[in-house]
């Protein structure tokens, strides 16, 4: 019974915390992006500094990927690692289950990262990467995550994700 | 009849994202191939002192395709360009370089990738085409596939896709896409029309990038049905792939 409750409401809990992340970080993203953009840099020292990490929800990224072009973001979503370019970060598990690919970003993992993170496939994760609005060979996605620096299981309520 | 040839065990149903990626790679490969032969024609139309030899490397820009003709230098740290053809609308404009232009970057990496792949592939008893496509995740795909040698006859098969490191020196994965070569030719009786083609896969459980390329390049344009992994895939004339369960 307890498991059923978690299975039904677990994703909603995560969803709500995601939306919270979007709303909380939303206001800060534009200013952080502007500060990190080459146009806003007044010296070469600042221009060479890596873009600051901003926490953004998938909803905001999916809604306007061009706005986040080149931004170094931390976001949360459902990761699937399949064959070749079938590697996506989806808004929700259901978006993967029903292949709503527009609700996803292609995650450009290197071969080494693919092996390293394979165990996190089909689970919700925290992911840090640079956003590109181009799509490469994953034309159905809404954009691409490149230069991936961190992927971790995101499961604060310890829900059995794979057993569902 | 078609069902009888399929057999094999059912595998996990490919995702929409996976099929979309096959379509995207196949489309890019078809564009690459078309750019390469149109650029070659454009170079030959300038009546060069000598025919372009060595490698041709195409890459897509926002303005269109650019194809460089040349070879690696002796130390393998430069790609020496003899000719470059740049797409402008439906034409390719040709520039020649004397002395040769020394390229690094993509042209050098792709040339080294092609060299690594062809060395591994070995000799063949028929002409082959080669294509290099950059991957968003770093590295590149290099394809080796049989060249069309007769007008109207389209070969498919005995083709390989290599995944290589970004410098083109290391093979990350070798994927034999098809084993034997099939030749698609229009019916001898011109009153007959072709509704589509079909073939089955024994090496893999999904359609391959070159299956999409075949559909996009073959004339007349007709869909291709592929039996693989217990499923029936249909590649439409625009390269999109749909999947259906094999009827019981």
Image: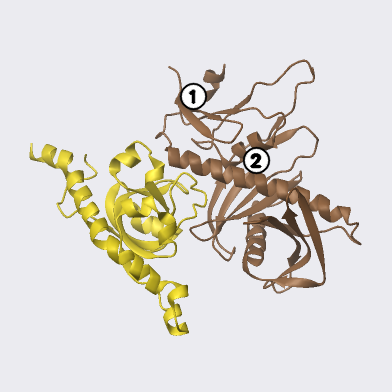
Chain colours: A yellow, B brown
Q: Secondary structure at mark 1?
A: loop
Residue occupying image coordinates x 73% and y 54%: B87
Q: Is residue B187 left or right of residue A154?
A: right
Along the line of sight, the residue nearer the viewer: B124 or B43: B43
Residue A90: x and y in percent read 34, 47
Same chain for the residues under marks 1 and 2 in the image: yes
Residue B76 lies left or right of residue B199; in this view the side is right
> Eyeballing the image, is B55 above or below B244?
below
Mark earlier in primary sequence (1, 2): 1
Q: Residue B34: x and y, percent?
A: 71, 46
Q: Does the image show residue B48? A: yes
- Examine the image and state in which quarter residue B103 appears: bottom right
Q: Residues within 10 Å of mark 1 (few under 14, many from 20)?
A: some
**Chain of the residue displaying label 2:** B
- Quarter the C terminus of chain B occupies: top left
Label 1 marks a residue whose chain is B
Task: Classify the position of the N terminus of chain B by image quarter.
Answer: top right
Residue A160 seen in the figure: no
Q: Which residue is mark 2?
A: B158
Residue A108 in percent (x, y) is at 44, 56
Q: Is residue A82 above or below residue A53?
A: above
Front one among A6 and B168:
A6
* Occupied quadrant, residue B57: bottom right
Left or right of B175, for residue B115: right
> Which of the numbered marks, if any, corresponds to residue B7?
1
Query: B68 or A14, which lies in front?
Result: A14
**Which residue reaches farthest left?**
A1
Q: Residue at x 52, y 33 (%)?
A: B241
């Amino acid at each position: 019974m307890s498991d059923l409750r978690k299975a039904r409401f677990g994703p909603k809990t995560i969803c709500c915390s995601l939306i919270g992340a979007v709303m909380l970080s939303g206001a800060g993203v534009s200013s952080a992006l502007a500060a990190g953009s080459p146009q806003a840099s007044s010296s070469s020292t600042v221009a060479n500094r890596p873009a600051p990490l901003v926490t953004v929800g998938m909803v905001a990224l999916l809604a306007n990927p061009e706005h986040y072009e080149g931004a170094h973001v931390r976001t949360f979503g459902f990761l699937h690692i399949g064959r070749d370019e079938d590697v996506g970060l989806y808004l929700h598990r259901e978006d993967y289950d029903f292949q709503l690919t527009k609700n996803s970003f292609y995650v450009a993992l290197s071969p080494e990262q693919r092996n390293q993170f394979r165990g996190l496939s089909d689970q919700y994760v925290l992911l840090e990467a640079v956003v590109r609005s181009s799509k490469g060979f994953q034309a159905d996605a809404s954009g691409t995550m490149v230069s991936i620096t961190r992927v971790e299981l995101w499961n604060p309520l310890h829900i059995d994700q794979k057993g569902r | 009849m078609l069902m009888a040839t399929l057999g094999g065990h059912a595998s996990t149903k490919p995702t929409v994202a996976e099929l979309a990626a096959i379509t995207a790679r196949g489309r890019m490969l078809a564009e690459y191939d078309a750019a390469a032969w149109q650029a070659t024609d454009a170079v030959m139309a300038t009546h060069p002192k000598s025919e372009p030899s060595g490698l041709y490397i195409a890459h897509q820009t926002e303005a269109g395709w650019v194809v460089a003709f040349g070879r690696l230098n002796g130390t393998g740290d430069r790609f020496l360009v003899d000719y470059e053809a740049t797409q402008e609308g439906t034409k390719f404009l040709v520039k020649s370089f004397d002395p040769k232009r020394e390229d690094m970057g993509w042209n050098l990496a792709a040339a080294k990738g092609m060299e690594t792949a062809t060395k591994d592939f070995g000799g063949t008893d028929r002409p082959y085409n080669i294509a290099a496509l950059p991957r968003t995740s770093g590295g590149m795909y290099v394809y080796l596939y049989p060249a069309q040698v007769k007008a109207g006859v389209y070969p498919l098969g005995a083709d390989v896709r290599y995944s290589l490191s970004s410098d083109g020196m290391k093979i990350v994965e070798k994927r034999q896409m098809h084993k034997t070569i099939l030749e698609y030719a229009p019916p001898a009786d011109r009153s007959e029309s072709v509704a589509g083609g079909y073939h089955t896969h024994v090496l893999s459980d999904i359609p391959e990038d070159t299956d999409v390329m075949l559909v996009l390049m073959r004339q007349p344009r007709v869909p291709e049905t592929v039996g693989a992994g217990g499923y029936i895939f249909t590649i439409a004339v625009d390269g999109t792939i749909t999947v259906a369960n094999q009827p019981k």
